[in-house]
Image (spheres, rainbow, N blue to C red):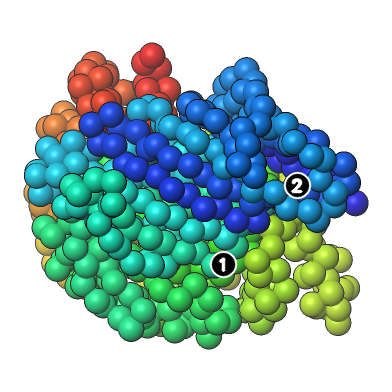
Amino acid sequence: MPEVVDTCSLASPASVCRTKHLHLRCSVDFARRVLTGTAALTVQSQEDDLRSLILDTKDLTIEKVVINGQEVKYALGERQSYKGSPMEISLPIALSKNQEVILEISFETSPKSSALQWLTPEQTSGKEYPYLFSQCQAIHCRAILPCQDTPSVKLTYSAEVSVPKELVALMSAIRDGEAPDPEDSSRKIYRFSQKVPIPCYLIALVVGALESRQIGPRTLVWSEKEQVEKSAYEFSETESMLRIAEDLGGPYVWGQYDLLVLPPSFPYGGMENPCLTFVTPTLLAGDKSLSNVIAHEISHSWTGNLVTNKTWDHFWLNEGHTVYLERHICGRLFGEKFRHFHALGGWGELQNSIKTFGDTHPFTKLVVDLTNVFLGFLKAYVEKFSYKSITTDDWKNFLYSHFKDKVDILNQVDWNAWLYSPGLPPVELNYDMTLTNACIALSQKWITAKEDDLSSFNSADLKDLSSHQLNEFLAQMLQRAPLPLGHIKRLQEVYNFNAINNSEIRFRWLRLCIQSKWEEAIPLALKMATEQGRMKFTRPLFKDLAAFDKSRDQAIHTYQGHRTSMHPVTAMLVGKDLKVD
């Protein structure tokens, strides 16, 4: 079988050499906004007569490379756009196959590192101390340290991180103690150990004025003190979710499962960093109604972190199985009707995405939603490929061997259409519609209502709808946007959506308002687009505001005013969306 090439990495491929372990020693400098330190990489040759190797870097300053106490030659190649610069290291002695060498690389990050966001005290809840967090997925670890920045290489790591003594450092690893920094009494060193091999996109660091609360036998929730009690309440179901996930996926091998609630500029809903899931504060709804994101991140402990896509072309292996597992966890916790309701909601989101991209766009290829017989396969799949990185062909071959008595059924599947063709997957849905039908009925009533019918609506319409159903009701309405302005004003009058703080509901409501050209919603939409930085919310809101002639200039002006306080990836992508340099 030909070697799978990772086109997103400039480093030597896993067939040439593999990084087995990283020992990171670094100091966090808030004044200069840099990490300075050494990365000691234990690299194993995969071939005979290996005389040099290449690592990924991006915007790094390299001071020196040392092997066995001696400085060696290295060369940084030309920058290749978002991929960064290849770093070729000459080995003093040629390595034979399976021979290991430790490369000690002294480096410093750039203040503009795409992997790091530095927050001033004013950008935090406490307003007293600065804050730093990393986001390495998909290819930003190279902007922290030189590495084979590809999911096809897995390594263990240990770390010693020096930070101001008032602050706490956490990583995607087991906490391994802390001590005063012997070189600076105003600082403290935190130690970490990750003994399960991981791809380097899962290396993560956070430094801030953090506190924790225990919410389960293996779970602490961390945040600034202003959010810690609220977070502990919101995520109190974590241990129940972990137990169900273990039942479905096999033993939890990572030891600790902590949660970190980040400041609002964190660009994602959640990030499955091992031992320490990062989550957005937009999940703090007050009623645990957005906790399915936690179920999703927990599921990644098996599918994504333990069994990993070999390259980003096979990303569906990480996300497809994780969504499947997430929905089954929620089904066990809240009932099968709830699982079916969420699956239908996901189908609606998929239709929206395909509508956005166009049904022939290459981004709409892949993704499978299989039947319940798949749960047994999922456990066997995790067992078979744990600690490995795999491709879609590996998955398909194992599927056939697992279901060897059902090969005739598998052969009826149009694999090319499922995996490689754009547009919607070739499947007819058969889900329980009970919870969804109530949302469809109310949305249809509004969509077909004439001006004279609007007085028939009242707040009692929502009395039997859960927040999940309210969200789905608005998703249905959004599919038919724009609505007449009279309808939008009446929706606000009878349901008072402006007063709802659930971020998912608020997001869909404000999109509906802007797409229906209600000028009064412009300040609210601008506020939501900037007071948090979750790209799922921020990018569509800015796009909608830019598409409305009455708010386009305000959207661009607001973006330019907030750009420096946004996460670097968010700022870059919103700028592209708005066509602003």
Q: Is residue 206 visible?
A: no
Where in the figure is residue 461, as x and y percent of width and height? 19, 64
Relative image position of residue 90 (x, y in whole percent): 72, 31
Q: Which residue is mark 1?
A: 196
536 is higher (above) or lower (below) than 459 = above
Q: Quadrant of residue 427?
A: bottom right
User: Which of the numbered marks, if any, corresponds to residue 312?
Assistant: none
Q: Name which residue lies at 86% across and 82% down.
A: 405
Tell me what residue is drawn at x 70 percent, y 49 percent: 101
Q: Quick one: 56 or 465, which is closer to the camera?
A: 56
In the rendered image, residue 379, in percent from the top left (x then y), is placed at 64, 79
Question: What's under tag 2, amino acid-wise?
Answer: Cys
Is 560 displayed left or right of 376 in the figure?
left
| Figure check: 62 above or below 219 | above
Q: Amino acid at mark 1?
A: Val
Q: Can residue 384 be seen?
A: yes
Q: Residue furthest front?
A: 69
Q: Nearer the viewer, residue 281 or 421?
A: 281
Classify 10 Å Cα crowding around label 1: few (below 14), some (14-19), many (20 and above). Answer: some
Identify the residue shown where x is 31% and y is 55%.
Answer: 189
To which quarter of the image does residue 174 belong?
Answer: bottom left
The residue wearing badge 2 is 17
Tell which of 495 and 452 is nearer to you.
Answer: 495
